Image: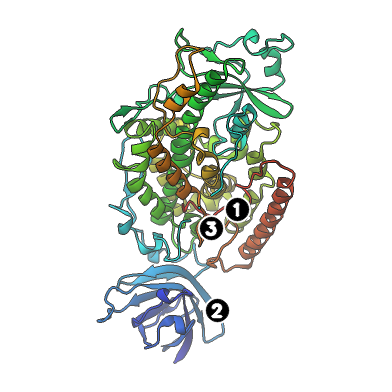
Amino acid sequence: MVSYKVNIYTGDLAHFSTFHDFRITLVGTDGESNPTKLTTWIPSFKLNPFTHKVECTTPLGDLLAIIVQKEHHLLFPNGSWFVAKVVVESPMGDIYQFPIYRWITDCKDHYFQEGSGWFTLSTLQRKNTLTLWDQPKDGLPYNIKAESYKALPLDASFSNKKKIEMWLTIGTNWKEDSFFGYQFLNGVNPMMIQRCVTLPENFQVTDEMVFKDGKQSLTDEMKKGNIFLCDYKMLDGVKANIIDGKQQYLAAPLVLLHKTDDKLMPIAIQLKQIPAEDNPVFFPTDSEWDWLLAKTFVKNADFNMHELSSHLLRTHLLAEVFTVALLRQIPMMHPLYKLLMPHTRYTLMINCLARQLLISDNGIFTKFASSGGEGMFTILRKALSSMTYRSLCLPDDISDRGLEDVPNFFYRDDGMNPECSYSFVKGILQYYYQSNQMVQEDQALQKWIGDIYSYGFLSEKNTGIPKRFDTVGELVKFVTMVIFTCSAQHSAVNAGQYDFIGWMPNCPATLERPPPSKKGEATEKTLLDTLPSSDITVQSMAAVWLLSKESTDSEFLGNYPEQRFIEDVPLKNIKVFKEQLKELSLQIKARNKALELAYTYLDPEVVENSVSV
């Protein structure tokens, strides 16, 4: 007889433990043990690890997997058990680690591979049949099939500790042109602005309109790279909401900005896409209330584009696509699973809540935003159909929008300097994939990207999303994008919501009067009548407060509390990554001390690993 020492670790909280008996089977290259019953009357969190011996008639060879089964308990028939990891010591002194970090809620067999055996034991790689796709609306990305958040697996649900708390607002600068321009770079939606090299044909602005002193020209300033454009054409034709029986309004403006003295200043605003006599172009030289009213319609348009395209679609819904594809196609001991699981934490749960509480028929956005209802799905469809792979990769996106040299662009600077996420992902994946052929032959990996292409991007070739991976480089770039989307990008468009949107006049959720068709008629009363009611204001403030508030059990970028990797090289890469992020955080804090308004949203100390709020 030979004896294997088995150490079973649960989570470190009382509710992670079990009173159940359970059985374990060891599977090796030379055979497998009989199922061995492990029994204790003491809750498992009191014996952490719980140690037992498994006796075998002959050695099992190299251990490949374990099979764990929780037995039925009369007093606790629905008891759940969180298994952190299992460590087995062979009679020869070899150590085998099984990182699990999963809830066991039933009494079925659960198969877990040895931590380094991701290319072996294909017979035990069970396909995940519990995670299914669902498409609630045509033309939108698929999401997890679940009637509500209560139907999600326990692994996808919030911990008992997760709470949501609240306040910081932008001060009194919301009327200032410089602050209006600043927000296109470092506000909650840095995704709209682009360098303008040619004026759109439907934006009929002349030199005399914007440079009345005649000392500058649009042509020269565009050649110098000093003219920028924000075009909300995606909102054109979107059906505006009706709230409490009252028609709401949503413009599709074009905004021209001029870089001067390292600031972006708005120089022209057109509120509708088609030039017409009743669609005037507004300028800073117009009356105070004409100009402020025009900027207000722009900020409302930006609110709707931000919440639906930049925030919901490009972070929440994409993160869910990445997560569901991972759970469906990638085995637990695969390096991609280990690398990406921390970036999926709570994503399914928060998105189920969003579908139920925010964008459902009775959701907050449906009831209080100018694009709520039919309009929001129109915007989401348009946004998905125009979204490209390059726009999701920060270096490519910044280059395509011509924003490489814009001064004081902290979203760009903090997101790209240094590119430590890319180096981290490259170091991990190159260790496991030592040739392009290994990438091409990894069927689980190819099914993962296939799911993302089909269910996330609806098989649209013009998105540029790959259908398969042929090289290690392609894999590294895509996985870097996934991690950036789930962590830093979400932080950039989420964490500052209450700061910028909490002061309603700076970013109103809806507007109650149509865009002005003439100049010289706006007054303070016109603006007040256009802004949303106090009830809508309170509801939208509460929503953005909840959406942007940090949780008490957040896991921040670079923190991997569950040690899924067991090899020295990936563990070293994680350590180096954390050190790089710490240095980046110090650089950001030092820079922010000299700023009138600190940009904190991409400081690694506040960037959560996943889309979890």
Look at the picture and state if 95 lies above or below 314: below
Q: How many marks?
A: 3
Q: Which residue is mark 1?
A: 425
Density class for disc 3 (Cα within 10 Å; few <14, some 14-19, many ≥20) is some
Going by the numbered disc 1, the residue's amino acid type is Val
Residue drawn at (36%, 64%) of the image: 154
Q: Secondary structure at mark 1?
A: helix
> Is 347 left or right of 229, judged from the image as shown?
left
The answer to whether one can see residue 458 in this image is no
The picture quadrant where one finds residue 413 is: top right
Q: Secondary structure at mark 3?
A: helix
Residue drawn at (62%, 27%) of the image: 177
Which is nearer the N-term, disc 1 or disc 3? 3
Callout in the foreground (2, 3):
3
Q: Position of residue 317 (x, y in %)?
A: 42, 44
Residue drawn at (46%, 74%) of the image: 13
Going by the numbered disc 2, the residue's amino acid type is Ile
